Amino acid sequence: MTSTVKVNNVQASDGGNIINQCGTNITIGASGDTIALASGASQTGFGRTGTVDWQTGDIKTATFTAVSGEGYFCNTAGGAFEVDLPAGSAGAIVSVQDYNNTFDTYSLTIDPNGSEKINGGEGSIVLNSEGEGVTLVYIDSTVGWRSIQDSAFSDVGSDYISATGGTITTSGNDKIHTFTGPGTFTVANLAVTPANNEVSYMVVGGGGGAGTGNNTNNLEGGAGGGAGGFRETKSPVTPYTASPLDGQPSAPNRITVTATAFPITVGSGGAGGAQTGPFTTGFPGTVGSNSSFSTITGAGGGKGGAGGPSPEGAGGDGGSGGGGGANNGCVGSGNTPPTTPAQGSNGSAGTTSAGGGGGGATAAGGPVTANNAADGGAGATTSINATPTAYAGGGGGAGETTKGCGGAGGGGAGYTNGSNGPGSGVAGTVNTGGGGGGAFSNNNSNPTTGGTGGSGVVIIRYKYQ
């Protein structure tokens, strides 16, 4: 037996319609009302509106199988993993979202069930952009799962910079981009807070090449090359220990980035002077090349002088100056061109059979006494790369009795004659901007070469979370 109840309207006690029929349309509730299902109840026939229930209490950190109707925040900080989609049925929906902007470091792979398709193609898709998210709806066997929404971190407002380029590492809330060769620092997204768009940076030019001596009149000792120019400015929002040459708060030194591509130049070290035969004058090194980022340039280090008179014996000007060769009092000037703070120091003069030392970022080349060669000047130590590291040390000179040590920060040591006869200088350390070490020559049958300057480096640091 069946019963039928026929009504056109069901009203609440205040007179408002709960169910209202108008022609063939039936309206449930009034405008602004919320229609709720009882706990445990389910609905059919209404379809979905492209939304999911986000599982905020279950952050995913390893491979899992998704459930239709759910959205997942995925944290790949511990390594890449995958999401296995459920078997497709018309209207099934799944969403995933980068939890804390790590997809660019460790990707998330979305894997279909069996041979089902994604966007009409076979196989998986990979999310590898910072902050990326995607919503997938299953349509049919022809298209399979269709992405109806795909977002990236750079597409939305953020209080932090998003950028690419160089080798990227992190330290606390900061990202660090290290360029050991030419490249591009590309800012895709700016912070809403202007202060967070100011970056910290260090720019070091290539170190100068060292000189070598000659075997005439005991002018055997070549001088050390000057270090590449050292430039650093620390943004107030990046907490690390900067060098004594921090350019804050001088306005010309501060860089606030824009959403654009910044070409990066990393200077090569200057070649060392090479003695190749019975010459009466020695051979000086060559100047290092400049490094640059935005408006900031670290000048190449000055050449180390050869043993003998000017012009070959004189040290060259540069970020830091090169030392003067044996029996030559002409030293290279540092901080050329001038900056504030100074980007480097002067070289030191040679004497008798010993070469002078190249200048470093924070100290001039050391003194020469008799036949004892000079040490290179000390560089500058900074923790911009998250570890206290010295850069831009001057090269040591070559001597009859003792060699000059390279300055802290990658400076190469000079050569000492001792009982070993002639010898070449030590190269400056790569990507420090250290000057090359001087070479020693006391005969024509064993050619010698001054140490090559170390290549430069550019490091950029900013707050990313």
Image: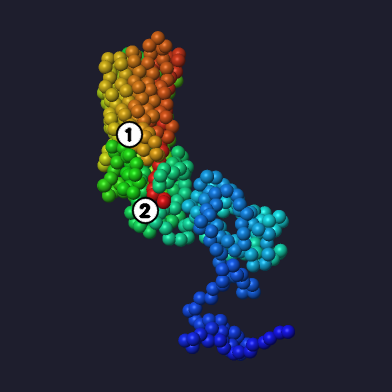
Choose top left, top right, bottom left or bottom right for residue 204: top left
Residue 288, x across and y down, in percent: 39, 34
Choose top left, top right, bottom left or bottom right for residue 160: bottom left
Residue shown at 57% from the left, 48% from the top: 62
Residue shown at 41% from the left, 22% from the top: 425
Looking at this rendering, what residue extends furthest in the front direction? 1
Looking at this rendering, what residue extends furthest in the top direction? 419
Front-lying residue, 319 or 192:
192
Color scheme of the displayed model: rainbow
Residue 385, x across and y down, in percent: 40, 39
- Residue 114 visible in image: yes
Residue shown at 59% from the left, 84% from the top: 26
Residue marked by disc 2? 197
Looking at this rendering, what residue extends furthest in the right direction? 1
Q: Mark 2 and mark 1: span between their CA atoms?
A: 26 Å
Q: Residues within 10 Å of mark 1 (few under 14, many from 20)?
A: many
Q: Amino acid at mark 1?
A: Ala
Up the image or down, 330 lies above or below 82; here it is above
Quadrant showing the N terminus: bottom right
Choose top left, top right, bottom left or bottom right for residue 429: top left
Q: Secondary structure at mark 1?
A: strand
Q: Amino acid at mark 2?
A: Asn
Which numbered disc flags the more N-terminal residue, 2 or 1? 2
Residue marked by disc 1? 380
Residue 294 located left or right of residue 144: left
Residue 47 located left or right of residue 247: right
Front-lying residue, 263 or 307:
263
- Residue 301 visible in image: no
Residue 29, x across and y down, in percent: 53, 81
